[in-house]
Image (cartoon, helix red, strand yellow):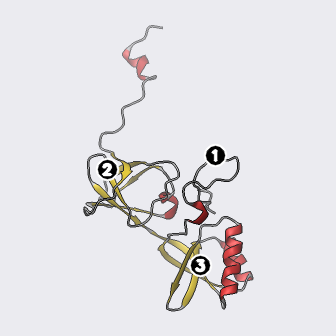
Amino acid sequence: MPMTAETLADFVMPAPATDVLLIEQFHEGDEPASEVLELDFGARTKSRLRTRLASGAEVGLFLPRGTILRGGQKLRARDGRIVEVRAAAEDLLEARCASAVALARAAFHLGNRHVAVEVGHDEAGDWLRLQADHVLEGMLVGLGALVSTLRAPFEPEAGAYAPGHQHPGDGSGARIHLMSGQ
Protein backbone atom coordinates (compact mmCIF):
# COMPACT_ATOMS: atom_id res chain seq x y z
CA MET A 1 0.00 0.00 0.00
CA PRO A 2 1.51 3.36 -0.99
CA MET A 3 2.14 5.94 1.71
CA THR A 4 -0.08 8.95 1.29
CA ALA A 5 -0.76 11.94 3.52
CA GLU A 6 -3.86 10.15 4.79
CA THR A 7 -2.08 6.93 5.75
CA LEU A 8 0.86 8.83 7.26
CA ALA A 9 -1.57 10.77 9.47
CA ASP A 10 -2.20 7.55 11.38
CA PHE A 11 1.48 7.42 12.39
CA VAL A 12 2.13 11.07 13.19
CA MET A 13 1.46 12.48 16.63
CA PRO A 14 -0.68 15.60 16.47
CA ALA A 15 0.96 18.83 17.59
CA PRO A 16 -0.02 19.90 21.12
CA ALA A 17 -2.85 22.38 21.30
CA THR A 18 -1.42 25.89 21.16
CA ASP A 19 -4.07 27.27 23.51
CA VAL A 20 -2.80 25.18 26.45
CA LEU A 21 -0.61 27.22 28.77
CA LEU A 22 2.47 25.21 29.76
CA ILE A 23 3.83 25.44 33.31
CA GLU A 24 7.21 23.82 33.81
CA GLN A 25 8.92 25.74 36.60
CA PHE A 26 8.56 27.37 39.99
CA HIS A 27 8.78 31.13 40.45
CA GLU A 28 10.77 32.48 43.39
CA GLY A 29 10.45 36.22 42.72
CA ASP A 30 8.35 38.88 44.44
CA GLU A 31 6.15 39.67 41.44
CA PRO A 32 2.44 39.26 42.13
CA ALA A 33 0.61 36.43 40.44
CA SER A 34 -1.70 37.27 37.55
CA GLU A 35 -3.42 33.86 37.61
CA VAL A 36 -4.62 31.36 40.24
CA LEU A 37 -4.45 27.57 40.04
CA GLU A 38 -6.80 26.04 42.63
CA LEU A 39 -6.30 22.31 43.21
CA ASP A 40 -7.21 19.79 45.88
CA PHE A 41 -4.38 17.88 47.54
CA GLY A 42 -4.65 14.85 45.25
CA ALA A 43 -4.14 17.04 42.18
CA ARG A 44 -1.29 18.94 43.89
CA THR A 45 0.68 15.67 44.15
CA LYS A 46 0.67 15.12 40.39
CA SER A 47 3.67 16.39 38.46
CA ARG A 48 1.88 15.91 35.12
CA LEU A 49 -1.61 17.36 34.98
CA ARG A 50 -3.97 19.00 32.51
CA THR A 51 -6.38 21.35 34.26
CA ARG A 52 -7.78 24.90 34.25
CA LEU A 53 -6.85 28.13 35.98
CA ALA A 54 -9.48 30.09 37.92
CA SER A 55 -9.74 32.31 34.81
CA GLY A 56 -10.75 29.28 32.74
CA ALA A 57 -7.51 29.05 30.76
CA GLU A 58 -6.39 25.47 30.14
CA VAL A 59 -2.95 24.56 31.53
CA GLY A 60 -0.58 21.65 31.35
CA LEU A 61 1.69 21.09 34.38
CA PHE A 62 5.03 19.45 33.65
CA LEU A 63 6.94 19.67 36.93
CA PRO A 64 9.74 17.47 38.30
CA ARG A 65 8.57 14.04 39.42
CA GLY A 66 7.76 13.91 43.12
CA THR A 67 6.67 17.56 43.24
CA ILE A 68 4.01 18.36 45.82
CA LEU A 69 2.50 21.80 45.26
CA ARG A 70 1.61 23.85 48.34
CA GLY A 71 -0.88 26.66 48.67
CA GLY A 72 0.85 30.00 48.16
CA GLN A 73 3.63 28.69 45.91
CA LYS A 74 4.14 30.48 42.63
CA LEU A 75 4.75 28.93 39.24
CA ARG A 76 5.99 30.54 36.01
CA ALA A 77 4.18 29.64 32.82
CA ARG A 78 6.09 29.33 29.56
CA ASP A 79 4.58 32.64 28.37
CA GLY A 80 5.94 34.41 31.51
CA ARG A 81 2.69 34.59 33.50
CA ILE A 82 3.01 34.09 37.24
CA VAL A 83 0.50 31.58 38.64
CA GLU A 84 -0.25 31.23 42.36
CA VAL A 85 -1.22 27.80 43.68
CA ARG A 86 -4.27 27.80 45.95
CA ALA A 87 -5.21 24.77 48.05
CA ALA A 88 -8.86 24.00 47.26
CA ALA A 89 -11.32 23.16 50.02
CA GLU A 90 -12.05 19.44 50.26
CA ASP A 91 -13.89 17.00 52.52
CA LEU A 92 -11.79 16.29 55.60
CA LEU A 93 -11.97 14.61 58.98
CA GLU A 94 -10.73 16.47 62.04
CA ALA A 95 -9.71 14.44 65.07
CA ARG A 96 -9.29 15.91 68.54
CA CYS A 97 -8.35 14.00 71.66
CA ALA A 98 -8.65 14.50 75.40
CA SER A 99 -4.88 14.39 75.91
CA ALA A 100 -1.62 14.82 74.04
CA VAL A 101 -0.91 11.11 74.52
CA ALA A 102 -4.22 10.15 72.91
CA LEU A 103 -3.56 12.52 70.00
CA ALA A 104 -0.05 11.07 69.57
CA ARG A 105 -1.56 7.56 69.56
CA ALA A 106 -4.05 8.59 66.84
CA ALA A 107 -1.23 10.18 64.83
CA PHE A 108 0.86 7.01 65.20
CA HIS A 109 -1.91 4.79 63.87
CA LEU A 110 -2.52 7.12 60.91
CA GLY A 111 1.19 7.30 60.15
CA ASN A 112 1.48 3.53 60.41
CA ARG A 113 -1.08 3.39 57.58
CA HIS A 114 0.85 6.00 55.53
CA VAL A 115 -2.04 8.45 55.69
CA ALA A 116 -1.31 12.07 54.79
CA VAL A 117 -2.07 14.11 57.94
CA GLU A 118 -2.17 17.81 58.68
CA VAL A 119 -1.31 18.72 62.27
CA GLY A 120 -2.65 21.93 63.72
CA HIS A 121 -3.85 23.96 66.65
CA ASP A 122 -6.61 26.51 67.18
CA GLU A 123 -8.42 28.08 70.13
CA ALA A 124 -10.12 24.74 70.88
CA GLY A 125 -6.82 22.84 71.01
CA ASP A 126 -4.70 20.48 68.93
CA TRP A 127 -6.10 18.54 65.96
CA LEU A 128 -5.23 16.12 63.16
CA ARG A 129 -6.85 16.49 59.73
CA LEU A 130 -7.01 13.90 56.98
CA GLN A 131 -8.97 13.29 53.82
CA ALA A 132 -12.42 11.93 54.59
CA ASP A 133 -12.49 8.14 54.85
CA HIS A 134 -15.13 6.19 56.78
CA VAL A 135 -12.76 3.36 57.74
CA LEU A 136 -10.19 5.74 59.22
CA GLU A 137 -12.99 7.66 60.91
CA GLY A 138 -14.09 4.44 62.64
CA MET A 139 -10.52 3.70 63.69
CA LEU A 140 -10.08 7.18 65.19
CA VAL A 141 -13.39 6.97 67.06
CA GLY A 142 -12.31 3.54 68.34
CA LEU A 143 -9.12 5.16 69.66
CA GLY A 144 -11.23 7.66 71.61
CA ALA A 145 -10.89 10.66 69.29
CA LEU A 146 -13.71 13.12 68.78
CA VAL A 147 -14.04 13.19 64.99
CA SER A 148 -15.88 15.83 62.98
CA THR A 149 -16.20 16.52 59.28
CA LEU A 150 -15.35 19.80 57.63
CA ARG A 151 -14.58 21.30 54.27
CA ALA A 152 -11.24 23.12 54.19
CA PRO A 153 -7.95 23.34 52.30
CA PHE A 154 -5.67 20.37 53.09
CA GLU A 155 -1.94 20.91 53.67
CA PRO A 156 -0.56 17.70 55.21
CA GLU A 157 2.86 17.40 56.79
CA ALA A 158 5.67 16.65 54.33
CA GLY A 159 7.77 14.77 56.91
CA ALA A 160 9.17 11.56 55.54
CA TYR A 161 7.43 12.28 52.23
CA ALA A 162 9.66 15.22 51.43
CA PRO A 163 11.70 14.81 48.22
CA GLY A 164 14.03 11.86 48.39
CA HIS A 165 11.87 9.56 50.54
CA GLN A 166 11.44 6.08 49.07
CA HIS A 167 10.31 2.69 50.13
CA PRO A 168 13.06 0.16 49.49
CA GLY A 169 13.07 -0.98 45.89
CA ASP A 170 10.21 1.16 44.59
CA GLY A 171 12.40 3.83 42.95
CA SER A 172 9.52 6.29 43.13
CA GLY A 173 11.15 9.28 44.83
CA ALA A 174 8.90 11.41 47.00
CA ARG A 175 5.46 9.97 47.61
CA ILE A 176 2.33 10.69 49.53
CA HIS A 177 0.11 7.66 50.04
CA LEU A 178 -3.48 8.69 49.36
CA MET A 179 -6.27 6.61 50.82
CA SER A 180 -8.50 7.27 47.79
CA GLY A 181 -6.08 5.38 45.54
CA GLN A 182 -5.21 8.44 43.46
- Foreground disc of the pair 1, 3: 1
**Residue carrying label 2:** 77
Provide the secondary structure element on which disc 3 rests: strand
- Crowd tier of the residue under label 2, counting other residues whose Cα lies within 10 Å: few below 14, some 14–19, many 20 or above: many
Mark toward the start of the polypeptide (1 vs 2): 2
Mark toward the start of the polypeptide (1 vs 3): 3
Whole-angstrom CA distance, mark 1 to mark 2, is: 29 Å
Mark toward the start of the polypeptide (2 vs 3): 2
Residue type of the residue flagged with mark 3:
Leu
Residue type of the residue flagged with mark 1:
Gly
Which residue is painted at 55% across and 69% down in the image?
157
Residue type of the residue flagged with mark 2:
Ala
Residue at far top of view: 2
Whole-angstrom CA distance, mark 2 to mark 3, is: 35 Å
**Residue carrying label 1:** 171
* Residue 53 located left or right of residue 121: left
**Residue carrying label 3:** 128
